[in-house]
Amino acid sequence: MKTLQLDLGVKSYPIYIGQALLSQAELLTQHITGKQVMIVTNTTVAPLYLEQVKSLLASFNVAEVLLPDGEQYKNLDTVNLIFDALLENRFDRSCTLIALGGGVVGDMTGFAASSYQRGVNFIQIPTTLLSQVDSSVGGKTGVNHPLGKNMIGAFYQPKCVLIDVDTLDTLDDRQYSAGMAEVIKYGLLGNLDFLTFLQDNIQGLMRRDKALITQSVYQSCEDKANIVAQDELESGKRALLNLGHTFGHAIENTLGYGVFLHGEAISVGMLMAAKLSQIVGDLNQQAVAQVQDLLEKSNLPISVDGKISASEFLSAMSVDKKVIDGSIRLVLMKRLGEAYISDSYQKEQLDQVIGDFC
């Protein structure tokens, strides 16, 4: 097992990464306050891991709530199911919520924890590659709105993140590839050595070599933890983690949540960011081709196949958390492994990229 520490002063917490961690009760129980534990999971993950997690909590008063599975259910109506379960079971302010599942479960559980009785403790047990390398770390919680993705939420940190990479054994190929998009993101935005590692080992990663997976998860979490420690509330550097996301969120919102998986939309979004970086004069054609090659080798989409009009796309981009005073801030790349935040591109340049992809 490897342990990372996300340094946020009194809100600091460990990230445990390794195999067979769901058999080590003390990793979990040492971070639980009180006697009441609510496990929040979904209908897909529950049959796989719910009983295993409950077996670690024999000395606690444990209840569970099963949510429907899918990005289309990441909304306030579903969060109310968590609140209903907490109230029906008379959970008090000393309770702990455990998010057992992917990014949707983690985001909604964290948001519920931030709001229930004005804030209770929660723990992340991410079971998808995407949630293990990205959404479970850093304290972003929330839900979607029909007009915009993740527009309702809070920054709220967990007490720990428990990443058992063995849970990826039950992840289907499409979800695994979707997680690879977020792994690749860390190489593109600020870690050229990691990007080179991914390029050199992509075949082994797609074969799900456990050693390569563990190394990739650890490096992704380390890179994110370092950025979040410097900018918890995304007032500056943390926005770099949104590489490809403003484009990707527009894809998800326009097509309908769940048509493209989050990581699939981010894949297209990162390639769009690379193309715009080329148009503004930063990346060369060879660098853009390297981005596309790595995405394709990860079995990720590189276009939306004409499913969205340019006007729809631009309209969806304008409803995003990165829009400030009407200006869309985008994460672009000066070179592979070095990203920056920009709103100085020309509208015609953005229109060109959107037109090429739509």
Image: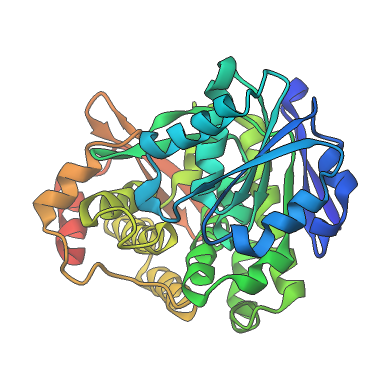
Can residue 133 be seen at all in this image of the molecule? yes
In the picture shown, does residue 251 fall above or below 151? below
The residue shown at (47%, 65%) is 178
For this view, does 298 lie left or right of residue 257? right
| Residue 70 drawn at (x, y percent) | 41, 55
Image-based side of 21 in relation to 274, left or right: right
Residue 85 occupies which quadrant of the picture? top right
Where does the image place residue 72, in percent across and percent down from the top left?
34, 51
In this rendering, the count of numbered labels is 0
Q: According to the image, what is the colour scheme of the structure?
A: rainbow
Image x and y of residue 63, in percent: 67, 39
The residue positioned 53% from the left and 63% from the top of the image is 179
The residue nearer to you, when weighing 352 against 69, is 69
Q: Is residue 352 left or right of residue 273?
A: left
Residue closest to the eye, 132 or 331: 132
Q: Residue at x 35, y 56 (%)?
A: 273
The quadrant of the image that shows the C terminus is bottom left
Does 288 appear above or below 11? below
| Left or right side of 214 for 152 | left
**Quarter containing the N terminus:** bottom right
Image coordinates of residue 13 in percent, x first then y, are: 76, 34
| Residue at horizontal 51 percent and vertical 41 percent from the top | 107
Q: Please, which residue is most extreme toward the top here?
A: 118
Asked if residue 238 can be seen in this view, the reply is no
Residue 52 higher or lower than 231, as above or below: below
- Location of residue 207 (image quadrant): bottom right
